[in-house]
Image: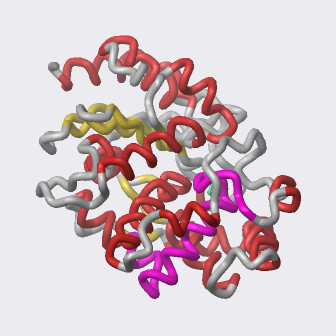
Amino acid sequence: MDYQAVIEEVAAHARPYAGQGQVADYIPALERVSADRFGIAVADIDGKVYGAGDWEVPFSVQSISKTFSLALVMAQGHSSHSGDDEIWRRVGREPSGTPFNSLVQLEAENGIPRNPFINAGALVVTDRLLTLTGDASTALLHFLREESGNPDLAFDQAVADSEADHGDRNAALAHFMASFGNLENPVPSVIEHYFWQCSIEMSCRDLAVAGGFLARHGLRADGSRLLEAREAKRINAVMLTCGTYDAAGEFAYRVGLPAKSGVGGGIVAVVPGRCTLCVWSPGLDARGNSVAGAAALDHFTTLTGWSVF
Ligand code: GLU
């Protein structure tokens, strides 16, 4: 497969979509990014990386961080001997059919979020990571630096502060779950670490490389094992069914790959056994997924025939 030729063709196809949609404006710090950026990177399972467009420009990973915090909780679960079962007692793995920051299901379902990729579920994962590491956001940042091979990755303080300033809904979700006994740490620490984790800045290159273990069935770039193959499969499965907000069905239909999107306009997608991709363009559709990013992934699987279906 000539990856470079494929992604250049994908970029040419998707670029006209860059600028369509709305840049996330729920916090001022995200609103400042120009909508017509577009980047794509592919990291194959041997660690070779190919890129086109703005593939080396850092952006706010936002909800893409939820994939990596889940992986880290599963990996840490090995060393604490609690395995990954512990987390699945506290968070489900079904699509929610409600917006990512919705409160309504939580009451009917006793404070157990539907899946780890809606905000409530991600807060539970961050809470678990806080218990396991003592410092969830720093542990995640170090993990991402190692996996991406980029020691310069950092939090964006302005984004983290802005999240906190507009954090009432996430605080409400966390308090609600705490009232059901589904948080182990105090709400202020859990949401603080969650805001920091969302604020990490990474490029398409960084994210494609860092997500390599999902294509390598749990193996890191150096060949050591981060996750059991079945755990990597589980993360990919939850990405496919729950990773693209309330449009996972549409995404499976159009793209057919496990993927996790964020309101910063990035989407990480996995072709198990072959490669990990990341696309970025800040204009979002009504569901919160990057318009040009989705068009790019759609075209990628059309050209390669590499959907999981
Ligand atoms: N920091 C955002 C929030 O919690 C995440 C948004 C997203 O990418 O879905 O509201």
Q: Along the horizontal axis of the image, is 15 left or right of 104?
A: left
| Residue name at image x 52 percent, y 72 percent | 196
> Is the magenta region chiefly helix, strand or loop?
helix
- Residue 235 or 34: which is nearer the viewer? 235
Q: Which residues are magenta?
A: 112-140
The x, y position of residue 209, in whole percent, is 26, 48
Name the quadrant of the C terminus: top left
At which x and y percent is residue 226?
27, 61
Q: Is residue 85 above or below residue 307?
A: below
Residue at left offset 86%, top offset 54%: 104
Residue 122, percent from left and from top: 60, 62
Judge whether residue 57 can be spotted in this image. no
Is residue 187 visible in the rendered image? The answer is yes
Q: In this orientation, which residue lies closer to the viewer: 260 or 61?
A: 260
The location of residue 18, given as percent across then percent down, is 51, 28
Left-right relation of 288 to 136:
right
Give 54 or 137, whichever is nearer the viewer.
Answer: 137
Residue drawn where x is 51% and y is 81% of the image: 130
**Does the magenta portion include 139?**
yes
Q: Is residue 37 above or below residue 30?
A: above
Q: Is residue 66 left or right of residue 42?
A: right
